[in-house]
């Protein structure tokens, strides 16, 4: 196996060395690709030092050396990659020693196009744990049972409690079918949830298999300044970012002819429901009345799902 590990780097001077070295522990890792995204801290200098110290570490920036976000940075990393397989890692997260144990066995089968595992949680400070434990807890982010690849896409869309989620940090995919089957990689217009949207489309186009689900293969690093912890603060409202997420999924599903009509209708209901949830009070009730008359299931199904899995998206 020749794995390219892609790490977008932004404001991560405290964590990037740990992330890189956690990937370099594996002989299967052919290269670690750092995409420095105009960090306001000293991350670029540390990335330069890492690239000089380790032959397998390669550093890139966007052509204009500007800040483009995690999605475009991962796209650039995929473009620069030379391995047969691709894995992703956020700059403040890290791999565990069992990260590729399942992959080494599963990828011997040609039909396996991707493998996902479980993600754990590491709090970098007591303050971070006190602040964000209600959101992340000590739980694994994982698909709860072993499902066949054909069930992964509807499982992600319907967000059933018995299915669960997998994370991009715990995903490994074959490079060739990724580029062949997905003409659009990460959406460049989503600053948040671009990984969720990508995983949704990925699970439709590629056959993804479960790897290690009962223990973490990578750790999400939680601290006071990472992007996900800003959601729910006064700066970023969760419902507003979810509207954009479901708008993208709805737009893609509308154009994708192979998606069953009942799944398309559910996606549209979810999009409408988040629009309702984020609307001003008067407009919200007007929208509710409209959909009660024209499409009752948008309320009965969509709003139920928002409440049911609210903390996960």
Image (cartoon, helix red, strand yellow):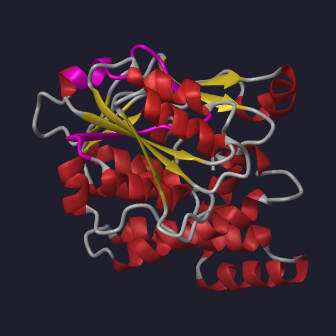
Instruction: Give the quarter of the image for residue 24.
Output: top left
Residue at 66% across / 22% down in the picture?
122
Residue 221 to residue 214: above or below: below
Q: Which is more toward the observer, 287 or 128?
A: 128
Where residue 114 sits in the image (x, y, percent)?
A: 27, 40
Q: Which is more toward the observer, 47 or 136?
A: 47
Q: What stretch is highlighted in magenta?
A: 82-104
Residue at 50% across / 32% down in the picture?
50
Residue 158 to residue 189: above or below: above
Q: Which is more toward the observer, 284 or 69?
A: 69
In the rendered structure, the answer to whether residue 158 lies left or right of residue 232 reads: left
Where residue 272 sits in the image (x, y, percent)?
A: 63, 74
In the rendered structure, the answer to whether residue 239 lies left or right of residue 63 reads: right
Report if residue 128 lies within the magenta region: no
Residue 285 to residue 181: above or below: below
Looking at the rendered image, the quarter that the N terminus falls into is top left
Where residue 210 sits in the image (x, y, percent)?
A: 33, 30
Determine if residue 163 is in view: no
Q: Which is more toward the observer, 126 or 51?
A: 51
In the rendered structure, the answer to whether residue 96 lies left or right of residue 116 reads: right
Determine if residue 245 is in view: yes
Residue at 85% across / 20% down in the picture?
126
Residue 215 to residue 2: above or below: above
Where residue 118 sits in the image (x, y, percent)?
A: 47, 27
Residue at 63% across / 25% down in the picture?
121
């Amino acid at each position: 196996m020749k794995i390219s590990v892609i790490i977008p780097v932004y404001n991560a001077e405290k964590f990037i060395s740990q992330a890189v070295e956690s990937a370099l522990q594996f002989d299967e890792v052919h290269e670690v690709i750092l995409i420095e995204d105009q960090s306001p801290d000293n991350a670029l200098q540390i990335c330069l030092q890492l690239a000089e110290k380790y032959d397998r570490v390669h550093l890139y920036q966007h052509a204009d050396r500007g800040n483009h976000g995690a999605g475009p940075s991962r796209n650039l990393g995929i473009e620069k990659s030379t391995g047969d397989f691709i894995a992703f890692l956020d700059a403040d997260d890290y791999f565990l020693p069992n990260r590729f144990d399942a992959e080494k066995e599963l990828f011997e089968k040609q039909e396996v196009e991707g493998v996902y595992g479980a993600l754990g949680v590491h709090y970098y400070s007591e303050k971070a744990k006190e602040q964000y434990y209600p959101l992340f807890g000590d739980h694994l982010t994982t698909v709860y049972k072993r499902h066949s690849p054909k069930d992964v896409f509807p499982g992600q869309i319907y967000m059933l409690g018995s299915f669960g989620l997998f994370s991009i940090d715990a995903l490994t995919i074959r490079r060739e079918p990724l580029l062949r089957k997905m003409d659009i990689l990460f959406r460049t217009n989503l600053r948040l949830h671009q990984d969720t949207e990508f995983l949704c489309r990925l699970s439709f186009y590629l056959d993804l298999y479960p790897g290690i689900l009962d223990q973490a293969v990578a750790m999400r690093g939680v601290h006071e300044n990472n992007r996900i912890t800003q959601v729910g603060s006064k700066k970023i409202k969760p419902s507003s970012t979810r509207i954009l997420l479901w708008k993208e999924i709805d737009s893609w599903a509308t154009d994708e002819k192979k998606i069953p009509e009942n799944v398309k209708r559910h996606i549209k209901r979810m999009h409408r429901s988040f629009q309702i949830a984020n609307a001003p009070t008067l407009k919200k009730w007007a929208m509710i009345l409209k959909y009660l008359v024209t499409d009752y299931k948008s309320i009965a199904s969509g709003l139920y799902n928002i409440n049911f899995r609210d903390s996960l998206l």
